[in-house]
Image (tube, coloured by chain):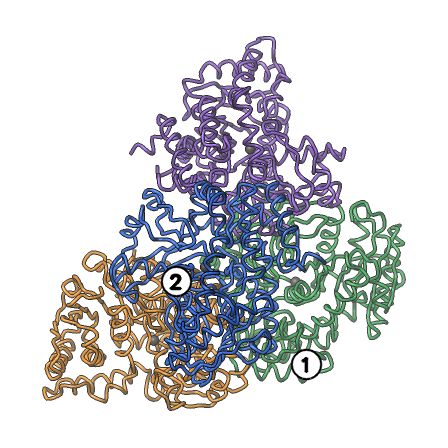
Chain colours: A purple, B blue, C orange, D green
Amino acid sequence: MVHKKQLKVAVIGGGSSYTPELVEGLIKRRHELPIKDLYLVDVESGREKLEIVGALAKRMVEKAGADIRIHLTLDRAEAIRDADFVTTQLRVGQLEARGWDERIPLKYNCIGQETTGAGGFAKALRTIPVILDICKEMEELAPNAFLLNFTNPAGIVTQAALKYSKIKTIGLCNLPIGLKMQIAEFYEVDVSKVDIEMIGINHLNWTTRIIVDGEDVSEAFLLKAAGAKGLTMKNISDLEWDGQFLQSLGALPCSYHRYYYMKDAMLAEQLVDLQTEGTRADVVKKVELELFELYKDPSLSIKPPQLEQRGGAYYSEVAVNLMTSIYNNKKDIQTVNVRNNGIIPFLPDDASVEVNSIIDADGAHPIQVTKQVGPEIRGLMQLVKAYEELTVEAAVHGNLKAALQALTIHPLVGNADTAQLILNDIMEQNKPFLPQFQR
Amino acid sequence: MVHKKQLKVAVIGGGSSYTPELVEGLIKRRHELPIKDLYLVDVESGREKLEIVGALAKRMVEKAGADIRIHLTLDRAEAIRDADFVTTQLRVGQLEARGWDERIPLKYNCIGQETTGAGGFAKALRTIPVILDICKEMEELAPNAFLLNFTNPAGIVTQAALKYSKIKTIGLCNLPIGLKMQIAEFYEVDVSKVDIEMIGINHLNWTTRIIVDGEDVSEAFLLKAAGAKGLTMKNISDLEWDGQFLQSLGALPCSYHRYYYMKDAMLAEQLVDLQTEGTRADVVKKVELELFELYKDPSLSIKPPQLEQRGGAYYSEVAVNLMTSIYNNKKDIQTVNVRNNGIIPFLPDDASVEVNSIIDADGAHPIQVTKQVGPEIRGLMQLVKAYEELTVEAAVHGNLKAALQALTIHPLVGNADTAQLILNDIMEQNKPFLPQFQR
Amino acid sequence: MVHKKQLKVAVIGGGSSYTPELVEGLIKRRHELPIKDLYLVDVESGREKLEIVGALAKRMVEKAGADIRIHLTLDRAEAIRDADFVTTQLRVGQLEARGWDERIPLKYNCIGQETTGAGGFAKALRTIPVILDICKEMEELAPNAFLLNFTNPAGIVTQAALKYSKIKTIGLCNLPIGLKMQIAEFYEVDVSKVDIEMIGINHLNWTTRIIVDGEDVSEAFLLKAAGAKGLTMKNISDLEWDGQFLQSLGALPCSYHRYYYMKDAMLAEQLVDLQTEGTRADVVKKVELELFELYKDPSLSIKPPQLEQRGGAYYSEVAVNLMTSIYNNKKDIQTVNVRNNGIIPFLPDDASVEVNSIIDADGAHPIQVTKQVGPEIRGLMQLVKAYEELTVEAAVHGNLKAALQALTIHPLVGNADTAQLILNDIMEQNKPFLPQFQR
Amino acid sequence: MVHKKQLKVAVIGGGSSYTPELVEGLIKRRHELPIKDLYLVDVESGREKLEIVGALAKRMVEKAGADIRIHLTLDRAEAIRDADFVTTQLRVGQLEARGWDERIPLKYNCIGQETTGAGGFAKALRTIPVILDICKEMEELAPNAFLLNFTNPAGIVTQAALKYSKIKTIGLCNLPIGLKMQIAEFYEVDVSKVDIEMIGINHLNWTTRIIVDGEDVSEAFLLKAAGAKGLTMKNISDLEWDGQFLQSLGALPCSYHRYYYMKDAMLAEQLVDLQTEGTRADVVKKVELELFELYKDPSLSIKPPQLEQRGGAYYSEVAVNLMTSIYNNKKDIQTVNVRNNGIIPFLPDDASVEVNSIIDADGAHPIQVTKQVGPEIRGLMQLVKAYEELTVEAAVHGNLKAALQALTIHPLVGNADTAQLILNDIMEQNKPFLPQFQR
Ligand SMILES: [Mn+2]
Ligand SMILES: [Mn+2]
Ligand SMILES: [Mn+2]
Ligand SMILES: [Mn+2]
């Protein structure tokens, strides 16, 4: 791809409210990443949003004087054909389905979250067939393109794509870059001075080393992190980590770990929220409505600052960083989701893992971790990865047995009878989106 | 050891109510296993029981006309010196401590059980230092003897002995033989016609193949097992397995799996019991009192049938089978706890695992499993083994960090704050038995 | 298979001079192994031999009063249909081809041997397609039968069958039982008193433990083995092992190891033999002529003692032992060639390995080795296994690149240019037997 | 180390003729790598050379106006104390011992080479105890310093240091950078445009991917490499690679591979050379004499161009690149020798391997290889690594059994009796340098 003069990028789910973020990023980096054609593609039901956000994108490009052509289309094949990068930010079943994912588990006193636990499981069942369909289309129309997958549960979806397709797929999350930014703020240094070593799987990774300006501050930072505010994602409750617990863990858990290590407290909070403001889907729906109202304004030709409230901070940063490093054969380090192949020796070779990787023209190459983690981290990672394997199997083959076992062993469910009840509800509610189980 | 004419066996915790069962077994097999000296050793606080049960043992031997000399002693070294087999059936802190193990977790709505969960954890902390002390004494006084460890949590205790001592240690449980007996009853065949393949760790193993009279009945048996009564140990509530669940699992869980797969129902039952009959320790205390009353009767010279209500069915069978096969270099198959060394490829090499093994003069040699298990079994096994590793580390080195992480990741605890509370209570209550944490 | 009343056995290459040995074995064990139908099948060019040896077999059965029906046929499908066991003792290209295997390498100063080195390589290329064809036929006509493969190079052929077919295949060699017999003679005990632990691959395995009458004599035996005569197969020169070398190895090499550890001396001997008596093929041709003359004698109705000079001692023992243990679900230990699956952790999972295994109705289940071998054994085993993998790839797919690399890395070739020259000769000479390379 | 203002470097074997090369490199990069103190240390017998080369070094520094203080000393502790980097370019037994290494194997028709085969083995026995002694001194006097080991056999020596010391050791060779330079010349691009992926162990590695200016030219280059001159080190005969052989290998072998793949031809050449110009040691002795004559010239204050004939091209480049990247936390990619830890999954974890690594302030972190190699590469690498393990064991513990096995299995020896003869000669000849075997 190096030296190619005209890049084509296809954004599946291009009508998303996040798109202006991505467009802004592409504009900023256009001197390093010469994109000629940006295809925003969406489904029929998203046509209106696509047109609104597409019009804004065009105004942004024009105002910036960037030589990027924005294409709006419902024809996915047209968008994919000969693309260099395909990114996915689609949401099967829209925010309504997210609401189901958050509410069904809560009926049974289980965490309701769209990327982990029973909610993430349901989302995986809906999403994986669509992503594999995109992969298939890419194999035909753009076999050498990279698939940059943002769609959650990103680790599981990426694992399915890596296992069932030959397309070069990299799974992305804004959590690693977010943590680097937070550490940079803590230490009041530029983010380029911060190196972190993450090991784990998407939304369940541990930061085992933190280097600031060449100095290893890992232990010191754990002391700071206990009780600290701000070390979390916008969409996750900011419960404080206990100091003794962090010391005993010897690594920094990620935001989503609260659902595991503080399961009961998080559940209690979700149950209260449910009675008051509703689930996160309800909140996001309102935010999105407001955003699209803003986007409609023909005088708006930059990314509106309100978008930053939406929760996807640095999303554009992540995508554009990755494309730029691949295009320029940069060989820098980014934390992404790739096929394991032994880099985490206690997980299966075909697992997707989220680890520091060298990014070059060929994609992402994991770097050996500096210190192997102990049983306190290993055990949980193995269990959740086993759940993920079962979920991929269930989603791809419509395998109900695997589905029941996936939910049963997930730490956020953990009872066979509860798993069966939740599974019944998921199947019932998501029926239109789960053709693989109708066979 | 083959051809040796005079065997010496030391039973640590010889004052246990189980001893008559063992003595009966040794008498029955004396033509295959020529034991000359049987040392029953106990601690000062168990002197009275030792004398009662020892007197009964002597009467049993005499009545049978067996040439076995029974020795009663409080001097452990005397018992161990030059022994061929050392068996452990000791209970650090007696039934009173068992009561703590069962009650403390229940305070925090967690399963209270003496071998698994937070209860098993506490028992491991108390027991491992004592077992390692026995190992050390054996290294000096009987370096070639086998240690047959029955003391629970047998898997964790065995792992500690295998890791921190060179003594040839084999961990035992009556659950495998119990299942074979139950299957034999179901099919109305002699137990010699039943082969089972178990894979897992102590009190968390799965039966993946069942052969009756040369025919593979694995799938058929899963259908029978759903809803069946009787497929459990005496000390575990006989909740029925759901048919669909068993089918999706594709293997037969063990009795103790109920604490995992039916966690909430088991917890509810324990909480009710606590209000009515007390915990299992309370029940056992009464049974033991009655047994020792029986044992005192000088006219009793056989194992009283009431002992079978006690819960340790086949315990003698297991111990005597193992000693006989070692002594006679039999090369038959028994399911025991041994060092993994790759036989379960997804567990650490130094883990103890419970698998089918060839028993010869050299000890136990695991047999390769016929079919590797899937993620539904693998994930849970890995997590609980990780807990076990942390528990061994905590118990051996008085490592509080490992202790907190062990409880945090255990599926029967699963919250960091609950783990901390339970740990505090355990440390407080068990203080006299936990010298390793006083340093 | 247990309890089945009428067993059918098919012997591919039934016209071999070895057949009377097998028939004798089946007659002796008929009370344990109730074979009803024994099919001797051969190819057109072997029709005469088949008739001679078949007639003898019938006389043997009749004389013994055994209820076994002997069938002679050129129709392989008829023989295989519904068989319980299929054994292979075929030789593609007959002894003439063996002569090529022995002579071609010698032209280039490389060991010429029919099972190892360049000779074994050529034999594998000829044989594997035929064996896979048999497997395919079995998949159709006798999918549950066991394939007992004696055809050399047995390890490579077995690996191909295990990798490219679902037929239950076990590879056999008389070397393990031969060693047990020799040890029994040394110690003047019955062979049932001898246990050995072998680890390795066919014709390259090491005996790491020797137990006689329950006592570990491993080290003592190494001292005896140095300089001893008789510790070899009939067909391998009886060069003495050096004592210091055996001590440094810490294990007993097999007969075929002479080609590796004593490469130059063995080569020198082969070159002398070539000038005098010819190669082993020439010798065997004469022996066979004499044997078939004997077989023709209508008054002969037992296995003639001269057969024992032929080199296949205990061949019948091995085959019959295996069938008997499978049929009777015996669960005894035999040393056979099976899929590795981690039992030798430093070889690929799909490698065939020759190790102690439990034999039951389901086949062969490897037992974990007692002590892992060191680099002195590991390195050589890995290299030769790599050669074997390449050979299987070459033989199955007609892959010339793999063929050249196989010969290049083999320790008995070891130069790229020599490898190329030998390969050219092999391809030229064996053309009619290597259709896979004509595509 | 980042931001540290005054670096101290100790060069063990500082009297080597290579030193001016290193000094030149340090001068050139002084703006990136602010070395304050450069200690050249040598043994008493090297005092004269040290003084000559040290004087030249001082003139070079002065002429360049660099602020580097050159220290000459025979006191190793003084040199090591508080050093940041320690590099080793020592030669135990000087060129005379190299002569033995080259001549002894040739007596037995085996390759005589100072880094591989029996010659490399002897050099390892002499060198490892000295390096471990340096490590021990570093543990006391400079525990955080990096040991950059150039001393051959660099892979084996590095493995010993990694296994028996906690010092951060990185093994170096100029072969990887040399290949990049050669490829850059072939393609007439700057070396910065060339990326190669190497996998293997020191002096036995394969280049599996070659990227020039972002384009994968791996296959094309193999075609070019066949028959090409120049793809070798100065000290290795430039025999041409055969095209078909390279195609079948699918990777580019390194220069030293000629000793394996072209063993007989290389041996023939060595035997001819022995009769004419002597061994390489003889040639080098003359070159060195000439060099030191040049060095003595007080008007010389730059590295003389004749040094480039010496064979250590790019040696300085390699050392200075590594120090610079560590000092500046550069995170660039270099091919160095590190502990395996699973990056080559079929070698032991504690093996040293030579692979692409990220270099940062913490040292070298291997990058996952892009494509795993096949059996043609794997087998040979495993065998030679097994030899290396045995050699480390022999060298560290004076273990004669391991020594005999090491030589026996080495592909360049390969007969047990030859191994014994060579070993005897090595022990006899090197006696003064092998105290570990005198115990
Ligand atoms: Mn994410
Ligand atoms: Mn038990
Ligand atoms: Mn054989
Ligand atoms: Mn080198």
B347 on left or right of B211: right
Q: Amino acid at mark 2?
A: Gln
Cβ–Cβ under 8 Å for marks 1 and 2 = no
Label 2, on which residue? B306
Chain of residue at mark 2: B
Badge 2 element: helix
Q: CA distance from mark 1 to mark 2?
A: 68 Å
The residue lying at 47 percent from left, 43 percent from top is B267
Q: What's the chain of the residue with tag 1?
A: D
Q: Position of residue C195 (x, y in %)?
A: 40, 79
Q: Is residue D396 above or below residue A236?
A: below
Vertically, is B80 above or below B430? below
State the quadrant of the N terminus of chain A.
top right
Name the element at disc 1. helix
Residue C370: give x, y in percent of width and height: 47, 71
Q: Is residue C426 left or right of residue A240?
A: left
Residue that mark 1 sits on: D437
Q: Residue drawn at (22%, 89%), measured in percent from left and top? A: C305
Taking the image as drawn, is residue C328 in sight? yes
In the rendered structure, the answer to whether residue A92 lies left or right of residue C31 reads right
